[in-house]
Amino acid sequence: MTSWPVGYGLLDLVEIDSTNAAARRRAQAGEQGPLWISAARQTQGRGRRGRVWVAPPGNLSATLLLRPKRRAADCAQLSFAAALAVADMLAPHLPGRDIRLKWPNDVLVDGRKIAGILLETESSGDGMAAYLAIGIGVNLATYPDDTEHPATALADLGNPLAPKDALLDLAGAFAKWY
């Protein structure tokens, strides 16, 4: 079993508006991170183009709050590390499946979206990132019907995975790629 990465905190919630919004609030309150924020249910999760959705229990809704000490414009590169970490987390549960990364923010299995990534940051006056929130949603149990790209869920493809176990594997994989 994977162990929690050294130096990373965890805030595990039952319900929240948005894990990315929680990361922003904590960063503005002085949280230094790295801190994973996870919720069993999100009521106002966000995606590209401001799309809002409800993330039901059984799926993974998590955000990593970082202080990356780099220019805000360069933080988008960490989308690659997040996507690779999601692929690493999924791979043992999907032998023989085609896992691909679709820039800038999707992970696909057999051509169907299983995970999305949303990076949000604020710049300080010198152009450096004041903080970075890396939001990751993974369809473990269910998937939404109203998506712009066909979607799927891990439960429909392979071995079911509990959100807490998925987060443990994801956090370890991200720490490796970061």
Image: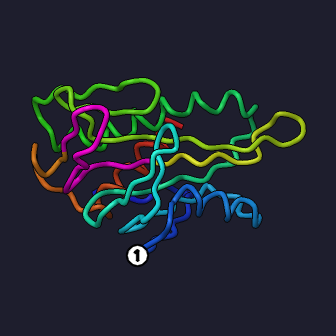
Residue at x 43%, y 59% (from the top left corner): 4
Q: Quadrant of the N terminus?
A: bottom left
Q: Nearer the viewer, residue 158 or 7?
A: 158
Residue 23 figure quarter: bottom right
Vertical placement of residue 75 versus 17, above or below: above
Q: Give the labeled residue for mark 1.
A: 14
51 over 168 or under it: above or below = above
Residue visible at 37% across and 67% down? Answer: 41
Query: In the depicted view, which residue is nearer to us: 112 or 126?
Result: 112
Q: Where residue 26 sits in the image (x, y, percent)?
A: 67, 65
**Residue 14 at what x, y percent from top left?**
40, 75
Look at the image and say whether residue 132 sits in the magenta stretch: no
At 37% from the left edge and 60% from the top edge, which residue is drawn? 54
Residue that protrudes farthest toward the bottom in the picture:
14
89 is higher (above) or lower (below) than 162: above
User: Residue 172: x, y in percent?
Assistant: 42, 49
Write the start and end of the magenta stretch as one range: 136-152
